Image: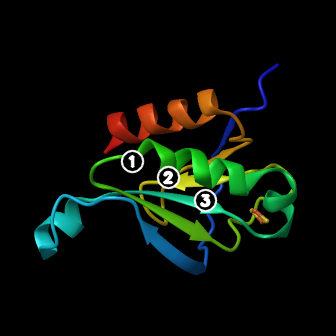
């Protein structure tokens, strides 16, 4: 059984700090079109390897995708957790491997 699971719960996270991998320009319009991946690096997810998850997303150097480090997505113990498509987007649990990260990116590109 895969540890890669999708949650339907919605949680309003607080941002710790953000990192912009790359954007397609600095205009307001470009920022509005930017896709986003939030990676929880709070205690439980960090214990599960979220720093590596964050590094895997950043290493992809995705054009027009913001990689945001976040404090908690409210699903502690199921991490590393990531959220795509803003505060109302799905939270994806157990994103640990390069393959997990690629699945999240595929979903991000399909849903945006
Ligand atoms: S510690 Fe990651 S969701 Fe709470």
- Mark nearest the camera among 3 and 1 is 1
Q: Which residue is mark 3?
A: 39
Q: Position of residue 70 (x, y in %)?
A: 61, 71
Residue sticking out furthest to the top: 1
CB contact under 8 Å: marks 2 and 1: yes
Residue at disc 1, secondary structure:
loop
Q: Position of residue 106 (x, y in %)?
A: 43, 31
CB contact under 8 Å: marks 3 and 1: no
Q: Which residue is mark 1?
A: 61
Q: Nearer the viewer, residue 92 or 37?
A: 37
> How many angstroms separate mark 3 from mark 1 (CA)?
15 Å
Q: Nearer the viewer, residue 67 or 58?
A: 58
Q: Which label belongs to residue 22?
A: none
- Mark nearest the camera among 3 and 2 is 2
Q: Earlier in the sequence, mark 3 or mark 1?
A: 3
Give the residue at x 61% y 27%: 99
**Left or right for 24, reference 3:** left
Q: Nearer the viewer, residue 85 or 98?
A: 98
Quarter of the picture holding the N terminus: top right
Q: Position of residue 49 (x, y in %)?
A: 79, 50
**Left or right for 24, reference 37:** left
Give the residue at x 78% y 50%: 79
Q: Position of residue 63 (x, y in %)?
A: 28, 49
Give the residue at x 68% y 65%: 73
Quarter of the picture holding the C terminus: top left
Q: Quadrant of ligand 1?
A: bottom right
Relative to 5, residue 9 above or below: below
Q: Which residue is mark 2?
A: 58
Residue at disc 3, secondary structure:
strand
Residue at disc 2, secondary structure:
helix
């Amino acid at each position: 059984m895969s540890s890669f699971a999708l949650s339907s719960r919605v949680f309003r996270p607080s941002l710790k700090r953000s990192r912009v991998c790359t954007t397609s320009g600095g205009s307001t319009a470009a920022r509005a079109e930017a896709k986003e991946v939030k990676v929880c690096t709070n205690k439980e997810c960090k214990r599960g390897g979220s720093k590596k998850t964050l590094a895997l997303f950043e290493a992809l150097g995705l054009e027009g995708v913001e990689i945001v480090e976040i404090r908690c997505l409210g699903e502690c113990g199921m991490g590393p957790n990531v959220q795509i498509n803003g505060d109302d987007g799905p939270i994806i649990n157990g994103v640990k491997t390069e393959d997990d990260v690629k699945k999240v990116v595929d979903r991000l590109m399909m849903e945006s």
